[in-house]
Image (tube, rainbow, N blue to C red):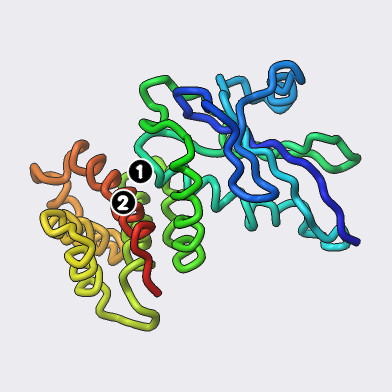
Amino acid sequence: MKKKDKFLIPIYGLKNSLKEDIKLDNNLLLRNINLLKKEHELFEEYGLRANYKAVLEVNYQYNSDNPSEPYPNISLNIVNEFDSALLVYGNGIVGAAGILPVLKRTGFRGYIIYSSKTKYEEGLNKDIDENFVYYYKKFLKAYSMRPMAFDVYRRSRDRFTNNDKTIDSCTVLESIFVPREERSKKSFILNGMKILGFKEEVKVIDDLIEYRNAIIHADIKKLHKLISGSKYNYDWFENTFKLMRKILSRYVEAPWN
């Protein structure tokens, strides 16, 4: 049986309210919080107390006979894509905070994706405007070609250790640049970087792969040697992980199969 329900996806990390509603397609509307309808109270019921400025309003159609609907399929079909799109769009801590049904049903409650409060200086460094519509259409094409790359990058946001983020970052690179069943991964990644125009960053990625290999092969002696040197410091890791967003953003501009 086909059904349609409305969901609200509060967006964290926006510094400014939207200047106008943004229609992404017939079922997705990005708009400001409606204070008259007391939508902020709905968020508070789920423990979301950050200062949200906008929501993604989703008119979600699904087969009610499917036990995977509306959760987790709404995440797989819509929210994962949208959340990843925000993360790649610009620098800053931004994304979907949760998936909340407008109408409450028995056993039919929303869930939280990200509940931490972000500081103003951590927020997205871009405004969401009509340019986002053009970007989002291009992003969907890129996501459909390399979902693993974007999903792993999204997951890595919540990782704590540099070792975990390093492995995730190399997985992202392999997902973008390396053909299936190809074993010579490093050469494809480094050549792919050059093709995308990241010539100066090739050495950084070469160093990242070296560090990742030491982790994967449990080469503790080599890992300790790398860490004890002057290269792999806090700033190096932070700048290298930020480079992943730039690479994904470049791929969105010119995706390939």
Q: Residue at x 74, y 51 (%)?
A: 71
Question: Callout 1, which amino acid?
Answer: Thr
**Residue at numbered disc 1:** 161
Q: Residue at x 38, y 26 (%)?
A: 122
Residue 210 percent coordinates (x, y): 19, 61
Alpha-carbon neighbours of circle 1 within 10 Å: few (<14), some, or many (≥20)? Answer: few
Q: Which of the pair 165/103 is nearer the observer?
A: 103
**Res. 124 image quadrant:** top left
Alpha-carbon neighbours of circle 2 within 10 Å: few (<14), some, or many (≥20)? Answer: many
Which quadrant would the C terminus be assigned to in this image? bottom left
Callout 1 secondary element = loop
Residue 213 percent coordinates (x, y): 25, 64
Q: Residue at x 57, y 21 (%)?
A: 50
Residue 145 percent coordinates (x, y): 46, 68
Callout 2 secondary element = helix
Q: Which mark is residue 244?
A: 2
Q: Which of the pair 122/254 is nearer the observer?
A: 254
Question: Callout 2, which amino acid?
Answer: Met
Q: Is residue 103 visible?
A: yes
**Position of 187 relative to 231 (above/below):** below
Q: How many labels were placed on the picture?
A: 2
Residue 183 percent coordinates (x, y): 30, 81
